[in-house]
């Protein structure tokens, strides 16, 4: 079963705009990670944020984590056509399994 | 570092047949994971190895499924008496034991179609 939900399920924006995706989860976590998946391919790790962190940046990515609300957001700034993909949040309680959400399908229109 | 590889990339089989998939993790990674992903859903955990020991199995892993990692390197996932509901993408991932590195590195997946 999925850990939580991502919102929105689908997002379509113009190239150059910012994209924000949200993730909610149910149980206590050690860390939360975001992955990208291009159609029919494997997942690529984007960024990890630990439970004692509130915000993290990596290039055009900004992730926030609110453990009191059990939620996270992923912001992609200045979107590009190559950012078109599905984005998944995943939680874990350590080095064991990841529990994924259902994903957000992001489409960047040129 | 050649990444995680999976073989085959695609498998079409008839219901009732057995299939076996292989995963080769990144060479220095001692943890190996199997996930299953159906269309439009996120991956779901199946099982996890640390070296050759299978440490956790999901309830999704029925008795028709078996996974091995005999020498702590590559792993195989076998599905016996396949059913149409087994059609999915089977993903393998590995992670490093160093420090507190929890990132998992995924292979390209094996897409199984059961007809």
Image (cartoon, coloured by chain):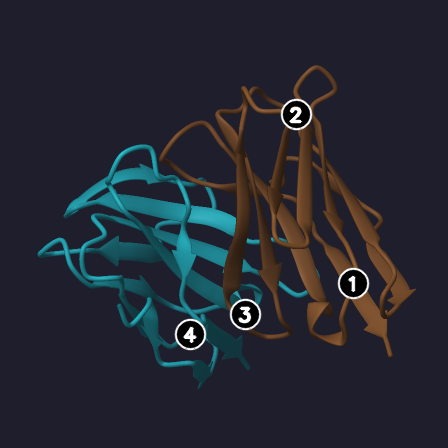
Chain colours: A brown, B cyan
To which quarter of the image does residue B58 belong? top left
Q: Nearer the viewer, mark 2 or mark 3?
A: 2
Q: Residue furthest top?
A: A68
Given the image, what chain letter belongs to the residue carrying mark 3? B
Q: A11 above or below A54?
A: below
Q: Position of residue B92 (x, y in %)?
A: 38, 60
Residue at mark 1 shares a chain with residue at mark 4: no
Badge 3: few (under 14), some or many (20 or more) residues near its Cα, within 10 Å? many
**Circle 2 — which element?**
loop
Q: Which mark is residue A26?
A: 2
**Quadrant holding the N terminus of chain A:** top right
Residue placed under numbered mark 4 in the picture = B16
Q: Nearer the viewer, mark 4 or mark 2?
A: 2
Residue at 66% in and 19% down: A67
Pointer 1 with pointer 2, Cβ within 8 A? no
Same subunit: marks 4 and 3: yes
Looking at the image, is mark 1 or mark 2 nearer the viewer? Answer: 1
Horizontal placement of A8 versus A34: left or right? Answer: right
Q: How many marks?
A: 4
How far apart in space, not on screen, are marks 1 and 4 (Cα)? 37 Å
Q: CA distance from mark 2 to mark 3?
A: 28 Å
Q: Dot 3 corresponds to which residue?
A: B87
Q: Between residues A94 and A108, which one lies in front from this camera angle? A: A108
Marking on residue A106: 1
Question: Are there few (<14), some (14-19), or many (20+) residues within 10 Å of tag 1?
Answer: many
């Amino acid at each position: 079963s999925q850990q939580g939900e991502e919102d929105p399920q689908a997002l379509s924006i113009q190239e150059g705009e910012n994209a924000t995706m949200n993730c909610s989860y149910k149980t206590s976590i050690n860390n939360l990670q975001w992955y990208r998946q291009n159609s029919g391919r494997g997942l690529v790790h984007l960024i990890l944020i630990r439970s004692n962190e509130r915000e993290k940046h990596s290039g055009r990515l900004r992730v926030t984590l609110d453990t009191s609300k059990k939620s996270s957001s992923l912001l992609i700034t200045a979107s590009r056509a190559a950012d078109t993909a599905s984005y998944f949040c995943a939680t874990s309680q350590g080095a064991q399994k990841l529990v994924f959400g259902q994903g957000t399908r992001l489409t960047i229109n040129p | 570092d050649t990444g995680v590889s999976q073989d085959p990339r695609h498998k079409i089989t008839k219901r009732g047949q057995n299939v076996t998939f292989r995963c080769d993790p990144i060479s220095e990674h001692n943890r190996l994971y199997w996930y299953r992903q159906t269309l439009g859903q996120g991956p779901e955990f199946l099982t996890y190895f640390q070296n050759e020991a299978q440490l956790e199995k999901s309830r999704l892993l029925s008795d028709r499924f078996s996974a091995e990692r005999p020498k702590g390197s590559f792993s195989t996932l076998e599905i016996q008496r396949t059913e149409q509901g087994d059609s999915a993408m089977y993903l393998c991932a590995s992670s490093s034991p160093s420090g507190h590195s929890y990132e998992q590195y995924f292979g390209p997946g094996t897409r199984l179609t059961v007809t």
